[in-house]
């Protein structure tokens, strides 16, 4: 039995149309499945929690997210016990950084074929973010500052819908990034990693904590990040002039930005971040609000990922 959690509004409403084609395949092959459609932001968390709460002891279920990167984040956040889930993903969003890093098919039909092929799943790390009294999981990355401000604006800008319709949705990230950079004021930040390594920075544009190599529509911010090594990869962009940041950003599509002075890369299992200014924070591109402090750690258990 497959359990599909579907965001019908992904890719400016095309998610529902894509699902109809996918469901035809399931019916033709007499595949046993159940569907659950999200109706509002955060609904996938509740659906995932309800589905996984009923898993019998010593058994697993196949839980499939159909949507964008944000749908993955919500589905994972709702899972009661990630070690008892075999997780699959069918991309119907516009960013698809998860597919890039995990080398999954970006074509929904091919993604469904992979899921139905019954290949042996691979273990994947799942990070956990705590923001005050709230907490959740994510699959790709979280961050504070510039990258989060870009994610926030991309999520609400009408430009995204327009570019999606003509197949150029990825460009919206670059346009918004340049706009945000013009108005961004760097902030002092303190990072405490693994409870014993402290790093202080005076003019941080952003700090991103990565489980995967890519975020923000294809920026390869942490080229050596692995989703199965048990570590978080952290990038801090500090004390660069805005012209240098503008020059640096395009090179990040190829992972060549790490050679610039002011780019700092760390690895850890746990990190606490304090920002002097209240800044935007994101988790897999979804807003986590404006914060001074948050922390991230790796879940002790890994999830079985169909890949």
Image (cartoon, rainbow, N blue to C red):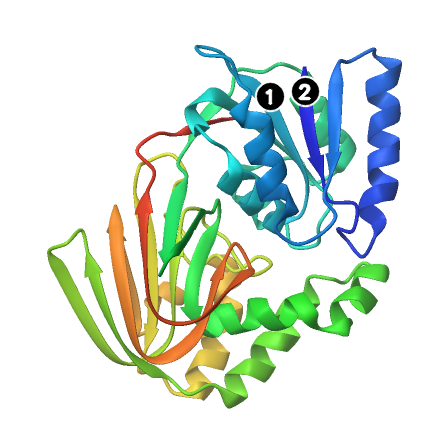
Tag of residue 208: none
Could you tell me which secondary element the residue under label 2 belongs to?
Answer: strand
Which quarter of the image is occupied by the C terminus?
Answer: top right
Q: Which residue is mark 2?
A: 2
Q: Which residue is mark 1?
A: 62
Q: Quadrant of residue 157?
A: bottom right
Q: Is residue 82 above or below residue 230?
A: above
Residue 166 visible in this rendered orientation of the protein: no
Looking at the picture, how far across and down is residue 150, in whole percent?
Answer: 56, 72
Which quarter of the image is occupied by the N terminus?
Answer: top right
Crowding near the residue tagged with mark 2, few <14, some 14–19, many ≥20 C-alpha atoms within 10 Å = some
Looking at the picture, how far across and down is residue 30, in whole percent?
Answer: 83, 11
The front one of 29 and 242 is 29
Could you tell me if the residues under marks 1 and 2 are in contact, i.e. CB atoms within 8 Å? Answer: yes
At horizontal 77% and vertical 53% (from top left) the residue drawn is 11
At horizontal 82% and vertical 36% (from top left) the residue drawn is 19
Q: Is residue 299 above or below residue 207?
A: above
Crowding near the residue tagged with mark 1, few <14, some 14–19, many ≥20 C-alpha atoms within 10 Å = some
Looking at the picture, how far across and down is residue 195, in whole percent?
Answer: 14, 54
């Amino acid at each position: 039995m497959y359990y599909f959690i579907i965001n019908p509004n992904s890719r400016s409403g095309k998610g529902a149309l894509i699902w109809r084609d996918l469901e035809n395949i399931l019916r033709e092959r007499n595949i046993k499945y159940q569907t659950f459609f999200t109706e509002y932001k955060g609904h996938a968390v509740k659906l995932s929690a309800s589905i996984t709460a009923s898993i019998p002891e010593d058994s697993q279920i196949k839980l499939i997210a159909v949507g964008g990167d944000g749908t993955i984040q919500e589905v994972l956040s709702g899972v009661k016990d990630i070690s008892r889930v075999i997780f699959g993903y069918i991309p119907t969003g516009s960013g698809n950084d998860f597919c890039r890093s995990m080398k999954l098919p970006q074509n929904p039909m091919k993604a469904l074929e992979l899921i139905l092929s019954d290949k042996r799943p691979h273990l994947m790390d799942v990070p956990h973010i705590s923001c005050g009294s709230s907490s959740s999981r994510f699959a790709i990355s979280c961050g504070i500052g510039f990258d989060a401000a870009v994610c926030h604006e991309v999520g609400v800008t009408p430009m995204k819908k327009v570019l999606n319709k003509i197949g150029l949705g990825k460009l919206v990230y670059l346009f918004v990034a340049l706009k945000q950079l013009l108005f961004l004021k760097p902030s002092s930040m303190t990072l405490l990693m693994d409870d014993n390594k402290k790093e202080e920075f005076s003019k941080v544009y952003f700090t991103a904590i990565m489980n995967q190599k890519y975020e923000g529509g294809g920026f390869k911010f942490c080229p050596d990040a692995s989703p199965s090594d048990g570590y978080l990869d952290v990038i801090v962009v500090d004390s660069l002039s805005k012209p240098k940041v503008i020059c640096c950003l395009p090179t990040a599509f190829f992972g060549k930005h790490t050679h610039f002075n002011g780019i700092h890369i760390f690895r850890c299992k746990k990190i606490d971040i304090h920002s002097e200014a209240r800044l935007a924070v994101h988790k897999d591109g979804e807003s986590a609000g404006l914060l001074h402090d948050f922390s991230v750690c790796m879940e002790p258990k890994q999830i079985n990922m169909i890949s």
